[in-house]
Amino acid sequence: MFFSYATLSLVGIVLLFAISTAAHMQMSDPAPLNSSFNSHSVEPKDYSMSSPLVNNSPDGPVPGGYPCKGYLSLLGTPEGAPTAVWEAGSNQKFTLAGTAIHSGGSCQASISEDKGATFKVVKSYIGKCPVEGGGSLDFNVPKETKSGEMIFAWTWFNRVGNREMYMNCAVVTITNGGSGLHNYPDIFVANLDASCGTDEGFDVYFPKPGTPDRVVNLSTSIHPPHGACAPPKQETVAYSPPETTATTTTTYTLTKSSFTTTTSGPTNPQPSCECRCVEPGLKSGYVVNISPFTN
Ligand SMILES: *[C@@H]1O[C@H](CO)[C@@H](O)[C@H](O)[C@H]1NC(C)=O
Ligand SMILES: *[C@@H]1O[C@H](CO)[C@@H](O)[C@H](O)[C@H]1NC(C)=O
């Protein structure tokens, strides 16, 4: 067999390309929003789905940031069409591609039933995630998951290297679903600003990983995160409707819709906000005004 010089150069170029795109890890199945793995994606696609989330801004979401690298704008468009159909209660898997695993770390599989406002954890993988060469990780789609188009997210905190958070999101259709993932923990979010971080050299221990049947712990060296770790820009309150005959409790999401700081008063500055309770994906109402103290 003989190769011409031109053929050898071409091989070299192809190899270089393969190396540069193998940096870090990305989800290939289910195919994420704006990913080149997604047959619904159109140019310009994101050919570096394996790059970490861009840090938060105090002013709110930023392109490339949390959640989903900013690609939830594709929901409801042809590019946001579902890439998998999962029956609630079934066992499924997601596949990671790439080679740069940064000594693994900890991952979560989460589902959003409210178009990305909240993500509920359905499995936590503490340590050795991802494994060398990528591969598939299995989890159970809770039978409580609501039917319809939901967002599946894979998130990853690498053990070694820069302190980063990785997140790829895919639209999936849930069939034969239930009443919702209200009782599942919120997704763990860290390393996007100074408020919450993970320590290098350890697999992060998720403060709320889920029930034991939804946690796999392969870590040999585990560390909790440091700082005030909470889901960003979102507070959840349990709200009981003022009905005398009611026996049910509904969980509403309290969303901050405006935020101002007053410059007068006894202790300055004082925050005040108008907050709005929204039943995830459904009704809106119950505006709460939180005003500064005046003596
Ligand atoms: C998809 O990714 C590309 C490359 O980063 C970007 O230019 C494009 O705006 C993204 N699409 C959407 C809808 O955000
Ligand atoms: C996970 O495994 C590590 C190492 O064996 C252990 O120290 C840690 O307590 C375990 N955590 C949980 C939640 O099981």
Image: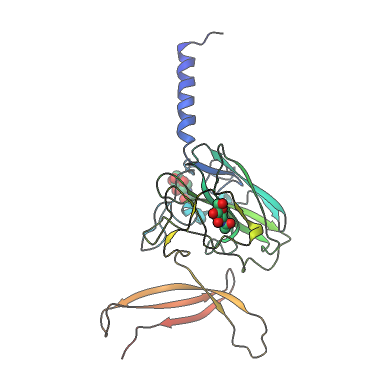
Q: How is the image coloured?
A: rainbow
Relative to 250, 89 lies left or right: right
Observer-nearest of 13 and 191:
191
Q: Whole-percent x and y of residue 127?
A: 54, 49
Q: Does the image show residue 178? A: yes
Observer-nearest of 21 and 208:
208
Q: Work out which quarter of the rendered image holds the C terminus and state it.
A: bottom left
Q: Residue furthest top?
A: 2
Q: Whole-percent x and y of residue 188?
A: 50, 59
* Residue at horizontal 49 percent and vertical 42 percent from the top: 103
Q: Does the image show residue 77? A: no
Q: Work out which quarter of the rendered image holds the N terminus and state it.
A: top right
The quadrant in which residue 266 appears is bottom left
Seen in the picture, residue 240 relative to 76 is either above or below; the reply is below
Observer-nearest of 82 and 28:
28
* Residue at horizontal 46 percent and vertical 14 percent from the top: 6
How many numbered discs, if any?
Answer: 0
Relative to 180, 115 lies left or right: left
Q: Whole-percent x and y of residue 200?
A: 42, 49
Q: Whole-percent x and y of residue 140?
A: 68, 55
Observer-nearest of 139 and 22:
139
Seen in the picture, residue 224 relative to 166 is either above or below; the reply is below
Seen in the picture, residue 99 relative to 111 is either above or below; the reply is above
